[in-house]
Image (cartoon, rainbow, N blue to C red):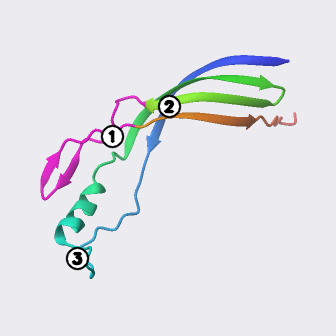
Amino acid sequence: MLKWRLTAGFVPVWSSTGFTRISDVPEGPDWSQEVVDALNAAETIPNSFYMNYQYGLSLGYGRFELSVFQSANLSRSISDGYTLNDTTYPFDRRIRSTRIGLFYTFDIKKEE
């Protein structure tokens, strides 16, 4: 039997970067202090925590479920700005995505 469902929810998002700040200008014709400063500043853009909301529609049959949902930022931006040469500039960064998922439900029962 097919089952339709509307879904909605809030999703906390934590992010981390493995970026190592560049201290010296690398050798090469494409490198300058301005390029290094811009790369270092880019790592200050994303917040480490923000909230998303999502909504969608799913169709289930037995243990399988096909879901289509839209996800977007609750605060409409995942950044407060970026800092370049000790000056902070506003920079709104938004994420909106449409996702399709196929799920399978496992039935785990505890023995009495």
Residue denoted by label 3 = 25
User: Under tag 1, what secondary structure?
Assistant: loop
Residue denoted by label 1 = 93
Return the x and y of residue 93 as percentages of the image width and height: 33, 40
Image quadrant occupied by the N terminus: top right
CB atoms of marks 3 and 2 within 8 Å: no
Query: Which residues lie in the magenta part?
Result: 73-94
Q: CA distance from mark 3 to mark 1?
A: 28 Å
Q: Residue at x 27, y 71 (%)?
A: 22
- Amino acid type at mark 2: Ser
Which tag, 1 or 2, sits closer to the chain's start? 2
Q: Nearer the viewer, residue 62 or 42?
A: 42
Q: CA distance from mark 1 to mark 2?
A: 14 Å
Return the x and y of residue 97 as percentages of the image width and height: 50, 35
Query: Against 52, is 81 above or below?
Result: below
Q: Along the horizontal axis of the image, is 54 left or right of 112?
A: left
Query: Against 8, is 95 above or below?
Result: below
Q: Along the horizontal axis of the image, is 75 left or right of 3?
A: left
The disc at residue 71 is 2
